[in-house]
Amino acid sequence: MAWSCWARLCCSREALSGRRSRGHRFTLYTLQRNGFKRMPQKMEPRKTNQETGSKPYRSSLSPPVQETVFCSSSRSLKHLVKPFFFTVGFTGCAFGSAAIWQYEYLKSRVQNYFDEARADWMEKLQPQKNGDFRKQINKWWNSLSEGQRTVTGIIAANVFVFCLWRIPSMQRTMVTYFTSNPASRVLCSPMLLSTFSHFSFFHMAANMYVLWSFSSSIVSLLGREQFMALYLSAGVISTFVSYVSKVTTGRFGPSLGASGAIMTILAGVCTKMPEAKLAIIFLPMFTFTAGNALKAIIAMDTAGLVLGWKFFDHAAHLGGALFGMWYVTYGHELIWKNREPLVKAWHEMRFKSRGKGGGGSH
């Protein structure tokens, strides 16, 4: 449920402030289809909020985003160049870092095997403390699946960003860096940061519930390291698809939410296990297969994209879902299973650096 906020677009060199109109409670801006069209040179000045005595409308569910200004139509496609290279570079770095992370983790597990066994033996000799808070936390943590432990950090990051939205002095920073918009002056970093950003508590709670529910399945299929690379890459890729859609249709405005990345996870699980039974949280008596659920979601987002629905960022949803389907079908074979040359190069670099360090110590 990545919410899309459509902003007004002007071609003047300075931003003209105007009164914000009241629309649907999930829509942050009204839509005007002027896109990147050039406006006449002479424009009548519009009265500001101070002159008219009116106050800008601010919904409790909508971030306080100012009007977006974009100038030349010739620059529209140019604003996709940096995001494209950022998407390719970030995706490559994410999977490369995940491969090295897995290598280092397995290596450390082998090295620390006897140390862990000794620590467990010493813990058994120590007297047990009943009611100890730390012990209860450890017990709860150990009761979680590997997937649930993996997404706990992601959920904590989303909660932290949600709290930042509540700080008045942080509003301008949050709008600039934690909402994605191809008409913004900052294009690349929000592609990742906006996937951890939620202004509404219901929006965040729904996304985190879906992520928690599918975490065990996806991590059991891919492993912790590959899952993290897929999730972070999916957030950036789905945002880039949203950028392309906004530039193509001329409907600009900031979007935020983890739905694009979560759609990748959901689509991956549904593609690998199409016969799995799913149910809606509020209607548990109605069950359906994962394959049918995925088809319904794709059909709804496709209709929303074609018909111009403004409720969600349907382009980001579709981009995330298609990426998830592609990755579990082909991408895993093309990317993750070909990581051996990178890991080997990393191992040789580590070995050479240690050899040089050891030689210098004598």
Image (spheres, rainbow, N blue to C red):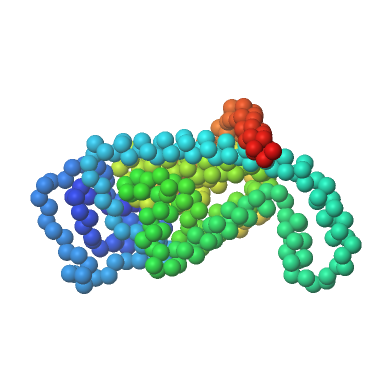
User: What residue is rendered at 47% in x and 47% in y?
Assistant: 192
Indicate whether 241 appears above or below 197.
Answer: above
| Count of numbered labels shown in the rendering | 0
Q: Where does residue 26 sit, x and y in percent of width and height?
A: 41, 58
Q: Position of residue 53 (x, y in %)?
A: 21, 72
Is residue 51 rendered to the left or right of residue 221? left
Rendered residue at 39%/67% (across/down): 169
Residue 352 seen in the figure: yes
Residue 329 visible within the image: no
Q: Quadrant of the C terminus?
A: top right
- The image quadrant of residue 166 is bottom left
Q: In the figure, is residue 329 to the left or right of 241?
A: right
Does residue 164 appear left or right of residue 127 in this picture? left
Residue found at the far front of this picture: 362
Percent position of residue 197, x then y: 48, 56
Residue at image point 85% right, 60% down: 123
Left or right? Give the position of 78 relative to 165. Answer: left
Farthest right residue in view: 125
